[in-house]
Image (tube, coloured by chain):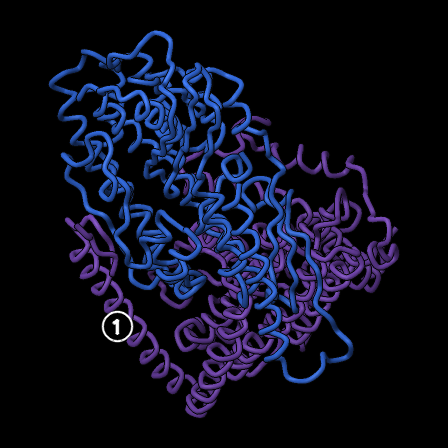
Amino acid sequence: MEISPFVRDWVLIPAAKAFIIINIMAVMAGVLTLIERRVLAFMQVRKGPNRVGPQGILQWVADTLKLMTKEDIVPSKAERIVHFLAPVLVVVPALTVFAVIPWGPEIRFKLPFIGRIETPLYVTDLNVGLLFVLAITSIGIYGIILGGWASNSKYALLGGLRSAAQLISYEVPMGFAVVSVVLMSRSLSLVEIIEAQRRAHLWFIVPGLLAFFLYFLSGVAETNRVPFDLPEAESELVAGFHTEYSGVKWSFFFLGEYANMVTVSAIATTLFFGGWLRPFPNVAVLGFLDLLPPIFWFLAKIGFFMFLYIWFRGTFPRFRFDQLMALGWKTLIPMAMVNLVLVAVAALWRWQGLRILGGIEWAVFLLALVYAWRRNKRAAALLAGQTTTGHVQAAA
Amino acid sequence: MSDDVSTRARADHALDSGTAARTSTLEGEPLLGLHEMELNFGPQHPSTHGVLRLVLKVDGEKIVSVRPDIGYLHRGTEKLFESETYVMGIPHTDRMDYVAAATNNHAFCLVVEKLLAVEIPKRVQVIRVLLDELQRISSHLLWLATSAIDLGAMTPFFYTFREREQVLDAFEEYCGARLTLNCMRIGGLPVDITPRFLQMVHDFAGPFLKRVDEYEDLLTENRIWKKRTVGVAVFTTEQCVEWGVTGPPLRATGMAWDLRRAIPYECYPELQFDIPVGKNADTYDRYLVRMAEMRQSIRIVNQCLEILDKAPAGEFKGKVPRVIKPPAGEAYACVESPKGELGFYLVSTGGNKPYRMHVRPPSFINLQALPEMAKGHLVSDLVAVIGTIDIVLGEVDR
C-alpha cells in the first residue's frame, strides 16, 4: 500500500522528527549532566563520577532511575494543582522550542515501506522562528514563579521572585541583541538567517560581536546558570524555587534547565556562528571540511557553548541580586540599544557597512584584551615577592 | 558569666535601636499592607557552617534584623573540665574549635603551665609553634573554601582541600589523629616528631606559596568576587574593640593586634613574621588579611623547620610532676587562634582538677558582631558575613 505524499510529508515525517528530537533532548540532558560533572572535576583536580559503567558513562542512567523511583513529596499546604503544573510549564516550552532549531540542511535516504525520503533536519521552518523562540522560552518563567509560589515555602518564594525579576530583565537585552541580527539578515526565519550568512560570506559574529556578548550573557542569566544562578543559589536559598520538589517533578525542572541551555547555545550558533555551516564556507581550499556532515558542525558549536557554561561554573562566584539587576538595566540594556543603532546604521550599506562595523568592533575588543592582559601582568609583577596583597600592609 | 549577660544585653539593645532606626527612615506606611517576613535561617542550612540558627526579619531581600540563636551544639565543656583531671581536659578542647584543635590544646596547656610555673624546653616550643601555624593554615584554608563556596565560587574549595589534606596527613603522622589532635600535654608534647613528619611538612611548605597564588588568581582580582565583598559588612576598629572582636576581623580594620606579638608566648618573639593589617575593615580586607596570614604562617613554618632539621630528635617534655596539681590561684592565658583571641581562665584550689575553667572563645565573641554587620544588607550578603566572621559552632556553643 502506498502512503499518500500528503500524509507522509505533513503528518508522518514531522511526527517522527518531533518524537526523535524530544527523546534525544531528554537523553541529552542526562548525558550533559555527566559531561558537566566530568569537566568540572577535571577543572577542580578531582575525578568525578567514574563508578557506574566504564568511566562512569552510565551514571546518568542510574541518576534517572533514582529520580524516577523517588517519593514525590508535596508540602502539606502547597497548592497541589499548581505545584504539579509548574514543572510541566517549565519542561514543555523548553522542548517545544526545538521545533524550529535548524540542526542541518536537507538529507535524503530510503526507508522500507515508506520509500525515498527527502527532508531537512528540522521539524519546521517558521517564518517567524526567532519570535517563536523568544515567545515560547518566556513561558517557562511562569513555571519557575508558580513553582516557587505553590510550594508554600519562604525559600522557594524568594527564589521564585528572584527568577521572575531576573528573567524578565534579561529578556530585554536579549531581545535587542536578537533584533540586531534580524537587521543583518532581514529575516526572522532561523534557516534564512543561516542562508544569509552563507550568501554574505560572513558569520554574523563579525559584525555582531557586541550583540553576541549581550545575547550569550543574557542567555546565561535566562538559564539560571553561574554567575547568574541566584534563583537557586544553594548557599543562600537552599535550592531556590525547587526546594520543595523531589523525584520526577524535580527532574523536570532539571530537564528544562538543560534543554534551555541547549536552546541558548543552538540559537547563539544559528545567529552568530553560521549554524550548520562549516568554518569559512566560501573558502574552496577548506573544502575537505565538507567531509564532515553539517550536523556535526552544528553540534560541535553547541558543544563549545555548553563547555563555556561549564567553564563559567568552574570559575565565577555568584552575583548579588541588586548587582544583577544593575548589570542588566544599567549596563546591558544601554549597550544593547547602542549596538542596535550601530547595526542599523551599518546595515544601510548592507554587507560593506557591516564588515566595517565588525572590523571596528573586533579591533576594540582585541585592544581591550591586550590592555587587560598587560594590566594583569603588571599587577602580577607587583605582587611577586610580596608577602602581602593589595592594600593589606605588614605591620611590625 | 557576667560578661556574657552584658554582651547579650548589648546585642539586644543594638537590635532594638536598629529596628527603630529603620522604621523612622521608612517613607510612609508599608505598601499594600505588606509586612516584613520572618525567615528562619538554619539550623539546617547549607551556609550557616554548622548548627547556627538565625531568625531574620526581611523586607523583600533586605535584612531588617538578625537574631542568632545558638546552643544546638552545647556540650557543657566548661563544666566537664571541673570533673576531670587536667590531662583528661585536653581532648575536650579538641572538640571546641574542631578545625583548629592544636591551638585549643595549646591555650589549655598554657594556662595550666602558667599556674604550675614550669619551664618549657626550647625545642618543645618550636614544635608547638610549628603545629600551631600548620593548624592556622589548615583552618584558613577551610575558611577560604567555605566562604568562597558561599559566594558561589566552587572551585577554590577543591584547590584548598588538596593542600589541607597534606596538613592533616602530617598531623596524622605526628599524633595519629587528623582533626581532634590532642597533640599537646601540660609541660610538653605527647610524642616526639618523626623524620617522616618533618619530610611531610617540607613537602607541604615548599610549593605552598605558589598554591596561595593560585587561590588568589581565582578570587583576588575577580570582579564578581570584589563586587560581593568590597564594602560589605564594614566593622570599624572602634566597633571591634567595643564588641571584643579579635583576630583577622580586627586586623582588617588596620589595628595590628596579634597576640603572638602583643602578649608573646612560646618562641614567637624570636621568629620573623609580619602582622598583615587591612584598611577598609570590609569583607574583602578580611579576605586579604587571611590570605596574607597564610603566607606569614608558612614563613614561620619554614623557620621552625630550619631549627628542627638541626635537631630532628630530642626532648619533647619539660619537667612536670607526674600528678598535675597546680597551686591554688587563678590564671588567664591566651593564644592567637586562627579565629582570634582564644583564652582560658583557670581557677585552681590546689586539687588535681580545675575548680573552674572558663573559655574565651573567639568565634562566640566575634559572632556577636553578626547582627550589627548584616543589618541593612541583603540575604545574599548574610552568607558572606557569616563566612567572613569565620565561626566554628563547636566553639560558639562549647
Determine the chain carrying the residue at label 1. Answer: A
Q: Above or below — where is A147 with respect to A135?
A: above
> Which sits in the foreground, A359 or B56?
B56
Q: Above or below — where is B156 with respect to A154?
A: above
Q: Is residue B311 left or right of residue B69?
A: left
Q: Colour of chain B?
A: blue
Estimate the x, y position of residue A38 in percent, counting from the top left. 49, 39
Residue receiving disc 1: A367
Identify the residue at horizontal 66%, vertical 44% (top origin). Answer: A27
Whether residue A28 can be seen here: no
Q: Residues within 10 Å of mark 1 (few under 14, many from 20)?
A: few
Q: Residue B184's quadrant in the figure?
A: top left
Identify the residue at horizontal 80%, vertical 64% (top origin). Answer: A10
How many numbered discs, if any? Answer: 1
Identify the residue at horizontal 44%, vertical 34% (top origin). Answer: A46
Q: Residue A278's quadrant in the figure?
A: bottom left
> Which sits in the foreground, B14 or B217?
B14
Estimate the x, y position of residue B33 in percent, counting from the top left. 78, 76
Q: Colour of chain A?
A: purple
Question: What kind of residue is marked 1?
Answer: Leu
Identify the residue at horizontal 20%, vertical 34% (top origin). Answer: B268
> Of all residues shown, which one is farthest toward the top?
B322
Whether residue B352 can be seen here: yes
Q: Residue B102's quadrant in the figure?
A: top left
Estimate the x, y position of residue A250 in percent, counting from the top left. 73, 48
> Which sits in the foreground, B324 or B244?
B324
> Which sits in the foreground, A373 or B74?
B74
